[in-house]
Amino acid sequence: MPTADAQALGEGNQAVLVSGKDATGNTVTGAQLLTVDIQPPTLAINTIAQDNIISSAEHNVALVLSGTSNAEAGQTVTLTVNGKSHTATVGSDGTWQVTLPATEVQALAEGNYAVNASVSDRAGNSTSHSANFTVDTSAPVVSVNTVAGDDILNNAEQAVAQIISGQVSGASPGDTVTVKLGTHVLTGIVLADGSWNVALDPAVTRTLDRGANTIFVTVTDAAGNTGAASRAITLVGVSPLITINTVSGDDIISAQKKVRH
């Protein structure tokens, strides 16, 4: 068959029909079914570690890489990560997966990496695909500024709102800052200049014990790494005490007393 004719065959099953005559002049025919398969299989890699970022917690455990392909079940997917090769098998549902051991994940330094994958179908057509991910194991660094100028809140300062503030490095603007004081949880965000602040309402301050209290602050970056800091503050003075005098001498109102009053 000329090359041009072979190239003109469409994808799928094709019938080859032949006919001829034997030495005695009888017509002889034959048929053969062949399949034209020149399309490479599809290959996809699922999101790595849920967000394509490996955090400090994820850096210490095995990593599952998975994806899909329309190559025939049983075909081998070859993956390369950081110079190491792994193989997976396409399942009957078109999925595949391979697990990188924790030792290999721990060997990945901070930075950007690529997963390179390839697969061939039974006809020999091959395809490749890659996906990028980042290793980010550094937790944000958060600090808490002095509260009320000296970390001591007197009665007057407890009666007005106080600003709890600080700085964060290694996080992005908009990341959440969580402040815990006693049983109360306050939230703020990292601002463009790396600062953060929350307002401590007098209603919250009134519920705190006199004496030492600790402010706990945490911030989590996009990779899931959490930084923490704390600061001790002291509440001084006596909480306002409201008293009510005895009513009617004995806290009992009789019918006679009711008439008199």
Image (cartoon, rainbow, N blue to C red):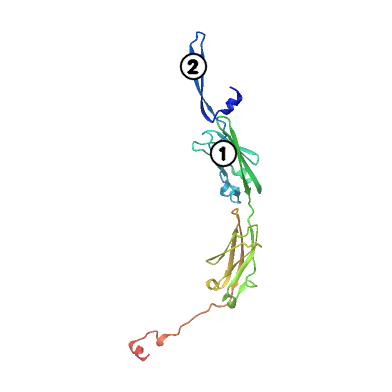
Residue at the outermost bottom position: 260
Quadrant of the drawing holding the N terminus: top right
Could you tell me which secondary element the residue under label 1 belongs to? strand
Q: Residue at x 49, y 18 (%)?
A: 30
Residue named by callout 1: 43
Q: Is residue 184 above or below residue 239?
A: above
Q: Quadrant of residue 140?
A: bottom right
Residue at the outermost top position: 24
Q: How many C-alpha atoms fall within 10 Å of the one at disc 1: few (<14), some, or many (≥20)?
A: many
Q: Earlier in the sequence, mark 1 or mark 2?
A: 2
Give the label, 1 or 2, closer to the camera.
2
Can residue 107 be seen at all in this image of the molecule? no
Of 25 and 186, which appears nearest the observer? Answer: 25
Residue named by callout 2: 29
Of 54 and 15, which appears nearest the observer? Answer: 15
Give percent across and percent down for residue 186.
Answer: 55, 65
Q: How many C-alpha atoms fall within 10 Å of the one at disc 2: few (<14), some, or many (≥20)?
A: few
Identify residue type, mark 2: Thr
Can residue 49 be seen at all in this image of the molecule? yes
Q: Is residue 222 above or below residue 130?
A: below
Of 210 and 132, which appears nearest the observer? Answer: 132
